[in-house]
Each structure stands twice: as C-alpha cells, then as structure tokens.
Amino acid sequence: MDDKQLAFLRVTDPEKYKEYMDTQARLEKMKYPKLDSNVKNDEFVARMYERFSGTKYVVEADGSHYQGKITQRKYYRRYKDECGRYKPGFWSYFYECEDGRWFDGSGWICEKPQEQRKPVDEVIEE
C-alpha cells in the first residue's frame, strides 16, 4: 500500500488503518527474530557476525540489525606463561561501532582493548 492509500485509509477508516499498521509491525518483528547464538549468561546481548562476502554486521539483543559504521582496529596482545614471564605476543583484531561499543574477534561485546606494545629485546653487555 503506498503513502496516498495509507493516508486515505487513516482518514476514512481508523480501525482498519490501526489493524494494517499492527500487521506491518508484526511482519517487521518477524523479519529479525532473536537468535539463540546471542545468549550470554542467560541474557540476550548484541553480537557481531560476518557474511561470506566479508562484510560485518551486528545483531542486537532484540533481533534488529545495527545500521551504523563498523571500524576494524588492530592491537598487539601480550601474554604470560606459567612462570609469569612475558612470551612473544600476537596481533588481534577488534571492531568498534560508531556508538562506542567494542567487539572482539569472536563477535562478542567487550571492553575497549588496552594498547600493548611489542616488548623491545634488551641487549645486556658484560
């Protein structure tokens, strides 16, 4: 139904207009169902997914899709071994949304990562 027909229906038959709008709202809600893979700690949360074409998208907790820009950021991560000594690190990707949320490489929402620089090898002369 186009805008003119919808406006005419709104004026002539408000009940039928309300019924039509409720149907459209139900159809829109069915278009984006809640995903069971978005459950973390028995609660629906936002999660990032990737299409086969490589584009990323975020499915919100209510099932709708995030429409803002997603930026990929690269951070160097260090970790310690069992003895507490730093081991060589690795580069990891994080994703930042325009609204300030961060997602890790597996698609889960996370805190903003801290920048960790690659350790400089020190040469000790005796």
Image (tube, helix red, strand yellow):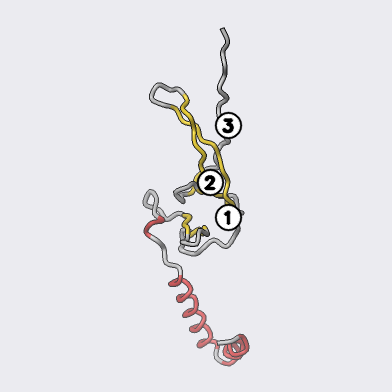
The amino acid on which the numbered mark 2 sits, given as a three-letter code, is Phe
Residue ID at (50%, 58%): 54
- Residue corresponding to mark 3: 117
Vertically, is 82 above or below 40? Answer: above
| Image position of 12 (left or right of 80) | right
Residue at mark 1 to residue at mark 2: CA–CA distance: 10 Å
Labelled pair 2, 3 in contact (Cβ < 8 Å): no
Q: SS class of the residue under badge 2?
A: strand
| N-terminal label among 1 and 2 | 1
| N-terminal label among 2 and 3 | 2
Give the farthest residue toward the bottom: 12
- Residue corresponding to mark 2: 94
Residue at mark 3 to residue at mark 1: CA–CA distance: 24 Å
Vertically, is 119 above or below 60? Answer: above
* Residue 67 drawn at (x, y percent): 57, 62
Q: For the residue carrying disc 3, how many other residues have a C-alpha within 10 Å: few (<14), some (14-19), or many (20+)?
A: few
Q: For the residue carrying disc 2, how many other residues have a C-alpha within 10 Å: few (<14), some (14-19), or many (20+)?
A: some
Which image quadrant: the C terminus?
A: top right
Q: Nearer the viewer, residue 61 or 55?
A: 55
Residue 70 is marked as 1
Residue ID at (38%, 25%): 82
Dividing the picture into quadrants, the one containing residue 10 is bottom right
* Residue 13 drawn at (x, y percent): 55, 91
